[in-house]
Structures are given as C-alpha cells and as structure tokens.
Amino acid sequence: MNNRQKNERRFWDKFAAHYDSFVRNIFGKTYKSILENIDLEINVNQTILEIGTGTGIIPFAISSKVSSIVATDISPDMIKIAAQKQADLNIRNLDFQVQDSYNLAFPDKSFDVVIASNLLHLLYEPEKPIAEVKRVLKDNGVFIAPTLCVGENTRSKIIATVIGSLSGFKVVNKWSFQDFKSMLTKNGFAVQKALRIEGKLLTAYIVMKK
C-alpha cells in the first residue's frame, strides 16, 4: 500500500463514524436533489458501480430501482458501517467492497452506470479514477458525477475552507462549474446533462456518456 492509500484510508476510517451525520447536517438538501436526479438516469435492468460510497447513502436509496449495485470505498471502516446497515435492512442486491478508485478490480466493460458522488474534488489525481471509470463502463455506459465546485467565487472558497477546518477533510480541486465540465471532457467523456444544485456550496450534477 502506497502513502496516498495509507493517508486516505487513515483519514476516512477516522471520519467514518461521523460521516452520515455530516452529510445529513451539511449536505442534506443537496443529497436529496442528487438522488432525485439519479432516479431519472437508472432503471431496473442496470448494473451499477459506485466509487467512494462512504457508508452507502446512495446505494441504499436506489437499490430497489436497479438490478444490482457494487459499492466501493478505500476505507474499511466506511464499508463496515455500510455492511451493517445492509444486514439490518436485509437488502440483497448490494455488494460493498473495499477498493481503491485509482485501480479498480473489475474487468473492462462491467457496468451500465458508474456513480462518483462528491469524490473527485477530494483527489489529487482525479484523472486516474476517471480513466478507471471509463475502462469499467460498458460501451455507451453512463457516468454520473455530482461534485462540489467551490471555485465559483471567493465566498464559496471561504465556506469550503471553514467546513474543511471543522471536519478535517480538504477540498483539493477548487473547480468552477465550467472548469469541472471541461476537465471531464478532456478526460474522454461526452457531457449529456449539467445541472447546478445550489446549497451551502454549489454541486455540479454531471451526467456523461462514454
């Protein structure tokens, strides 16, 4: 395990117990909008992958609407909490796995849809997981990437810094909405839908085709 993996795992393991309350208190309305929009992109015949699942907020919300979901996270403690939720709810079509989004252990063209929700802005090399997403997506597969874009203005940058200092997590990539779209295009995806979800911080809800 390299230093990046160790550092990411250590931080998110430490944060795992507080993750659900953090999302609920800081980004509750944003996630409601994200889930409403994801519902428009999925159907019961699809196989789904989520990278950076945390404690499984999105998979649990959509599990009844798709064929199957594999949900991965670099943090064993996040996956442990998600697996306990799954056992409590007795949901059968979810598979939680500890994996690194930079190097996914799936064959090429394995999934109809890949979701990366509020992950890419946290990564120092986002192009690497994006390349992995492209690899594991089926031809004409869909990539859904709701992502914080704190680079729209000075106010957003200050709020992100304050939230980061209180919670401990760092927004590495301070993209504007347009910068984020451009980055995804440069990495080989065709943007099909780009929505602005307003909240404490702007979230870009981007849907792409391979």
Image (tube, grey):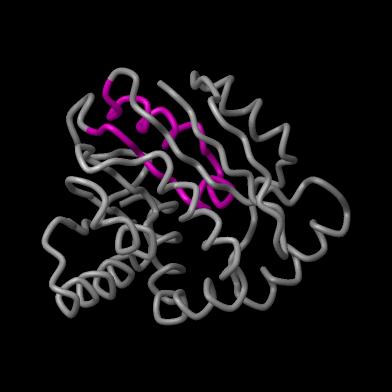
The part of the image, by quadrant, that contains residue 173 is top right
Residue at x 48%, y 28% (from the top left corner): 208
Quarter of the image where one finds residue 168: bottom right
Q: Position of residue 64 (x, y in %)?
A: 23, 57
* Residue 125 lies within the magenta run: yes
Image point (82%, 63%), residue name: 158
- Which residue appears at 71% of the width and 53% of the height? 202
Dividing the picture into quarters, in which one does residue 43 lie? top left
- Is 160 left or right of 76, judged from the image as shown? right
Which contiguous range is marked in magenta? Answer: 111-138
- Residue placed at 81% from the left, 46% from the top? 152
Instruction: From the viewer's side, name the closer residue of 63 and 174.
Output: 63
Instruction: Report whether 108 appears left or right of 158.
Output: left
Percent across and percent down for residue 72 are: 29, 53
Q: What count of labels does the image hold?
A: 0
Residue 19 in picture, x, y percent from top left:
46, 74
Name the foreground residue: 97 vs 59: 59
Instruction: Indicate left or right for 42 with 202 as reference.
Output: left
Q: Position of residue 24 (x, y in %)?
A: 53, 75
